[in-house]
Amino acid sequence: MAIRTLLTELFQVAHPLVLAPMGGVSGGALAAAVSEAGGLGLVGGGYESDRVAAEKVLALVPGLRRSALENRRFLRRVVRLLAAEAGVSQFLDIGVGLLTQGAVLTTS
């Protein structure tokens, strides 16, 4: 018996079951099994193919690595300022879901 929710309608799946994309854990076989069962199976990152693709992009855009690092440093400064001086106590970090160095979760 299918359960109807906003999630099932939006993604056209039979069950409101989502396999979170956990890097190095939720590979293609597990994602396929969840999808075959009527849920939404997502594949995590952190695989060798991800690293190869990133290196190819970095070769095409030489300043990209520095730009990404500066972006992360700016994010840390802004979060610290908002938490310390503006009294902001909750942050919503919308990203790819991969915990990285200097993430909002660990900065605030």
Image (cartoon, rainbow, N blue to C red):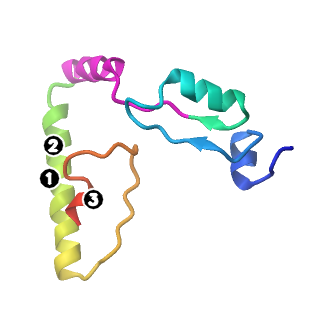
Please give the label number shown on residue 108: none
Badge 2 element: helix
- The nearer-to-camera label among 1 and 3 is 3
- Is residue 12 rendered to the left or right of residue 28? right
Q: Are marks 1 and 2 in contact (CB under 8 Å)?
A: yes
Quick one: label 1 or label 3, which is nearer the N terminus? 1
Identity of the residue drawn at 14% across and 47% down: 70
Identify the residue position indicated by label 3 in the image: 104
**Amino acid bearing label 2:** Leu
Measured Cα–Cα span from mark 3 to mark 2: 14 Å
Relative to 52, say whether 5 is above or below: below
Magenta segment: 42-60
Graded by Cα atoms within 10 Å as few (under 14), some (14 to 19) or many (20 or more), the crowding at tag 1 reads: few
In the image, is residue 57 part of the stretch drawn in magenta?
yes
Name, please, the residue furthest toward the right.
Answer: 1
Residue shown at the point (26%, 17%) measured from the top left? 56
Identify residue for label 1: 73
Residue 91, given in percent of the width and then of the height, sits at 35, 67
- Which element carries disc 1, helix, strand or loop? helix
Looking at the rendered image, the quarter that the N terminus falls into is top right
Q: CA distance from mark 1 to mark 2?
A: 6 Å
Residue at left offset 66%, top offset 30%? 35
First in sequence: mark 3 vs mark 2:
2
The residue beneath circle 2 is 69
Rendered location of residue 46, percent (x, y): 33, 29
Mark 3 Cα-neighbour bin, 10 Å: few <14, some 14–19, many ≥20? many
Amino acid type of the residue that numbered disc 1 sits on in the rendered structure: Arg
Question: Residue 23: x, y in percent?
Answer: 38, 34
Q: Is residue 49 above or below residue 96?
A: above
Q: Quadrant of residue 19?
A: top right
Q: Is 100 on the left-hand or right-hand side of 28? A: left
